[in-house]
Amino acid sequence: MSFEEYAALARQLAEHRRADERDAAAESARRRDLHAAADYLHQRLTAQGQRLDQLGRAIGVDQPPAAAPPGPPAGFGTSAAPEAGDGDFAGAAGAPGRAGVGAYPELPAGQARLALPTAMSPAGGGVPTQRAAAVDPVVELELARRMADEADRHGQQAELLAQRPALLPTWSPLVRAVAVYAACGAAAGVLMLTLVLASGIGLVDGFTLGAWICAGLPALAFFAGYLVLGRWGRPAMVAGTPPRYLPLGFAICFLLVPLGYCAYLVLFRALR
């Protein structure tokens, strides 16, 4: 071999070496990027899981129990294993919980040629095994990122719903309080009419009727509205106690029932 041929061969080997080093550096950078993306997705999914736990506790949903880890396969790490003559298939060929059913169901004669391609087991036993499909980590990470974005969107919608109370969720707090206190006052007005009718037939005297109309029924209506707002007018996720407008509720309840009695008297005299 001449010196020129030796030099050309040395240059060719050097170029191959540099190309291999560039490929190795690119592969190393690709692996670092994949690990960084996987770590970021892991942290993001962990934060999403914690936020979902908080939402579950806020709405009163208990966390589901952790699933038990799968046990070892039959015949592995145990002192006894089922024999082939027992009528059940052990290992991958057995379907758990279904006696006599194998992992490879028989196909009709016309569909046998449509079966998936299989490879022979390295143990030489002639058992066909499914070929493992190649997995692209970049594609899998992109799919995981899209699902994380979708989970974020649904989580934001859940938080918006959790910030609304169960009672009249689209109404403002002030209008909701007015509606609740007015409804309780109207219910007290129905009880007031019942007492008026009972007083007309002599079951309730005038002092008792006046006490219930001026103090008893308005107080019952006020406390009923207060409790209703505290129970169903409170959002699942809220910092502190939402306003229940106590002076407004007191005024509505203690004015609505006596005004209802006055309106009843005016209507009764007008109809006589």
Image (cartoon, rainbow, N blue to C red):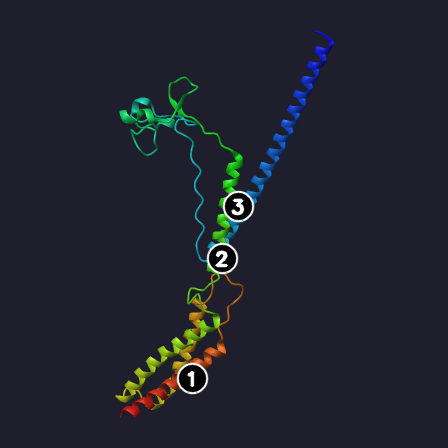
Foreground residue among 220 and 36:
36
Look at the numbered disc 3 and give the secondary structure of its residue. Answer: helix
User: Please, which residue is most extreme toward the front here?
Assistant: 4
In this rendering, the answer to whether 113 lies above or below 168 is: above
Look at the numbered disc 1 and give the secondary structure of its residue. Answer: helix
Which residue corresponds to the image point at 48% horizontal and 62% vertical from the top-left? 163
Foreground residue among 123 and 16:
16
Q: Are marks 2 and 3 in contact (CB under 8 Å)?
A: no
In this rendering, the answer to whether 25 lies above or below 229 is: above
Q: Give the label on residue 159, or none.
A: 2
Q: Earlier in the sequence, mark 1 or mark 2?
A: 2
Which residue corresponds to the image point at 42% horizontal and 34% vertical from the top-left? 71
Look at the numbered disc 2 and give the secondary structure of its residue. Answer: helix
Give residue 260's position: percent from left, percent from top: 37, 85
CA distance separating discs 2 and 3? 17 Å
User: Please, which residue is most extreme toward the top here?
Assistant: 1
Q: Which residue position holds label 3?
A: 45
User: Crowding near pointer 2: few (<14 within 10 Å), some, many (20+)?
Assistant: some
Image quadrant in which you'd find residue 221: bottom left
Task: Tell whether 179 sits left or right of 5.
Answer: left
Q: Which residue position holds label 1?
A: 255
Q: Earlier in the sequence, mark 2 or mark 3?
A: 3
Foreground residue among 84 and 177:
177
Give residue 206's position: percent from left, percent from top: 33, 90
CA distance separating discs 1 and 3? 55 Å
Foreground disc of the pair 1, 2: 2
Task: Tell whether 163 sits left or right of 6.
Answer: left
Image quadrant in which you'd find residue 102: top left
